[in-house]
Image (cartoon, rainbow, N blue to C red):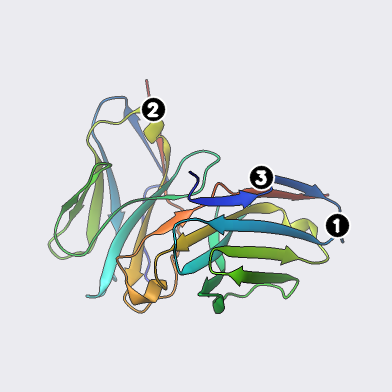
Amino acid sequence: DAKTTQPNSMESNEEEPVHLPCNHSTISGTDYIHWYRQLPSQGPEYVIHGLTSNVNNRMASLAIAEDRKSSTLILHRATLRDAAVYYCILVQGGSEKLVFGKGTKLTVNP
Amino acid sequence: DTAVSQTPKYLVTQMGNDKSIKCEQNLGHDTMYWYKQDSKKFLKIMFSYNNKELIINETVPNRFSPKSPDKAHLNLHINSLELGDSAVYFCASSERFFSGSPTDTQYFGPGTRLTVL
């Protein structure tokens, strides 16, 4: 299973941008980068995914390095509701499953 | 409308008992999954069914048996419960068998917290 490395925890203030990094130096050409988050006492929820180009959706933006060995999930204005564990996951074409790592626990301060 | 629902939300039982957790999705998805999240918060896949057929079976004790009566339901039966089975169990679904599309996403249920005493 392809591996990702994320900081264990990060803190942010409400209404400020948050940049959550993820390293995936062993990424292969067909791996997609997916982000999920898990709010307290809830199941994980999909956030965003990308392959090579930067991606935007209503929840967040995903910035992918040119060599694809790292990516950054960007929350443009953090809210208290964004406090969660964020998981960066590589999904291989032909893979059968999501492999969750430890993720980054994001704390948002009011 | 809840996309992926699980019952019960909490389950407290004695060691040695047999219990079931039910999962239903109303998204019309073909594939459903069971995950286990242990006390250290690691989330690991246990099983996956595609159109009622088992496609993933991780290294899980055979006391755990998934059953899919139709593609909208995937239930998890656990026999002879042990203390180590205490965890939160999540059901999930995706539109297609995941390997068919690495862009596909999974939708998770709210979880069932199982406590074995």
Residue A59: give x, y in percent of width and height: 28, 42
Query: Residue B50 or A34: which is nearer the viewer?
Result: B50
Residue A81: give x, y in percent of width and height: 40, 31
Residue A21 higher or lower than B55, as above or below: above
Q: Which residue is mark 2?
A: A80
Q: Which residue is mark 1?
A: B15
CA gap between label 1 and label 3 equals: 19 Å
Residue ID at (49%, 53%)? B108
Q: Is residue A64 left or right of residue A92?
A: left
Labelled disc at residue B9: 3
Q: Chain of mark 1?
A: B
CA gap between label 2 and label 3 equals: 25 Å
In the image, what residue type sits under mark 2?
Leu
Residue ID at (31%, 24%)? A14
**Res. B113 visible in picture:** yes
Residue A23: give x, y in percent of width and height: 29, 58
In the image, what residue type sits under mark 1?
Met
**Res. B40 visible in picture:** no
Residue B41: give x, y in percent of width and height: 56, 50
In the image, what residue type sits under mark 3?
Lys
Query: Residue B46 or B1: which is nearer the viewer?
Result: B1
Q: Chain of mark 2?
A: A
Disc 2 crowd, CA 10 A, few/some/many (<14, 14-19, 20+):
some
Q: Chain of mark 3?
A: B
* Rendering quarter of residue A74: top left
